[in-house]
Amino acid sequence: MIDSKSALTGTQKVAVVLMNLESAVAATVMAQFTEAEATDITAEIVRLRRVDADVAENTLAEFNAMVSTGRLAARGGTDFATGLLELSFGAERAAGVMNRVASNMAGKAFEFLDSAEPGQIATLLDGEMAQTIALVVAHLRPAHASAVLGGLHDDLRTDVAQCIATMTSATPESIALVAGSLKSRAAAVVAPQNSFEVVGGVQPLVDIINRADVAMERALLEGLDARDPELAEEIRSRLLTFADIVKLEARDVQNVLRGIDMTILAMAMKGSAENVQQTIRDNLSERNRELLTDELDSMGPSRKSQVEEARAAVVRAIRELEQSGTITVHRSEEDGFVE
């Protein structure tokens, strides 16, 4: 609850005003904002729930609003925010705004773990149920989550991966409960920061696995194969592979190859499809093509694990550039190139 000692932001003041208007009037006002502005205002309405009467009156006076007699207690919360948005934008757009609000609020709950080492997080989660660990890991940055997942023993790691992939939307209350419990235990080792990731479902697990090493990827998929073959197959179908380099535009392939050592690239190309090799050669400078050819000619038989590790290095480079927005990866077949 916001009391008389609290200093309101501009967005909170707008929220308080809307919370004190009749729904129809408030909806008319809300409709004047952009969806981005409405999202911020809605988040404050959800957070505020109820506001001290003095704060409400002072805020309304500041906006030169008409204040009716009596003490005011502003209404807020999810139901009020949803109803207001539906009246303002219609049910479909309202649902979209509320989903964004819920995602943003949920993601921020675990932002205090961004500064923790993966080992610290694993220790913090020791003894928790797989569902709880999955909820936390799914809200970490994919690279961070991958490191945490890698620190779990095989059976628990498979449990957690399955929970992430099959996770449905968690309520804000349950997320806040888990985050609050962890935060109180982590206070001595974790410093708060201001960044967050929000996820849930198969794709977040795919993002995590794409940043893992080959051994962890193999162990996870083998574990899921034994429990849920259909889920394992769906994850495999979404995983980025070395062969997906043919789906990149030429300038993106060049960006990827620019950061790959020729020895690693040559190892990754061993046994690869002709169109993959041709795509790589076509996007190298003449000098680098010569270096690549020399590497391939001098390279004898290689272990499969060495080739997989080299390909994983190329995939990680693709993922990092995609994550930064430098390149775009087309995952559907119709978006790929036809040779």
Image (spheres, rainbow, N blue to C red):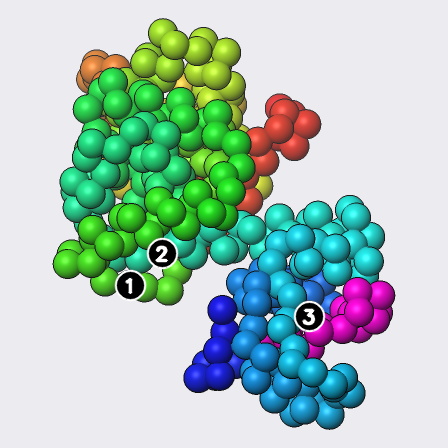
Q: Nearer the viewer, residue 278 or 190?
A: 190
Q: Position of residue 68 (x, y in %)?
A: 76, 84
Q: Which one is earlier in the sequence, the residue at label 1 or at label 3?
A: 3
| Residue 224 picture quarter | top left
Q: Which one is earlier in the sequence, the residue at label 3 or at label 2?
A: 3
- Which element type, helix, strand or loop, lies under badge 2? helix
Q: Position of residue 255 (x, y in %)?
A: 44, 48
Query: Looking at the image, can residue 52 be seen?
Result: yes
Residue 329 located left or right of residue 19? left
Separation of residues labelled 1 and 3 (CA atoms): 31 Å
| Image point (20%, 58%), residue name | 187
| Residue 53 picture quarter | bottom right
- Chief secondary structure of the magenta span? helix
Q: Which one is earlier in the sequence, the residue at label 1 or at label 2?
A: 2
The residue mark sitting in front, 1 or 3, is 3
Query: Which residue is under mark 2?
Result: 111
Q: Amino acid at mark 3?
A: Met
What crowding class fits label 2: few (fewer than 14 Cα within 10 Å), some (14-19), or many (20 or more)?
many
Query: Which residue is under mark 3?
Result: 19
Separation of residues labelled 1 and 2 (CA atoms): 7 Å
Q: Can you tell which mark lies on residue 161? A: none
Residue 335 located left or right of residue 163? right
Q: Is residue 129 magenta?
A: no
Query: Which residue is under mark 1?
Result: 192
Q: Amino acid at mark 2?
A: Glu
Separation of residues labelled 3 and 2 (CA atoms): 29 Å
Residue 103 located left or right of residue 255? right
Q: Amino acid at mark 1?
A: Pro
Q: Nearer the viewer, residue 157 or 83?
A: 83
The residue mark sitting in front, 3 or 2, is 3
- Which element type, helix, strand or loop, lies under badge 1? loop
Range covered by the magenta-colored residues: 11-30
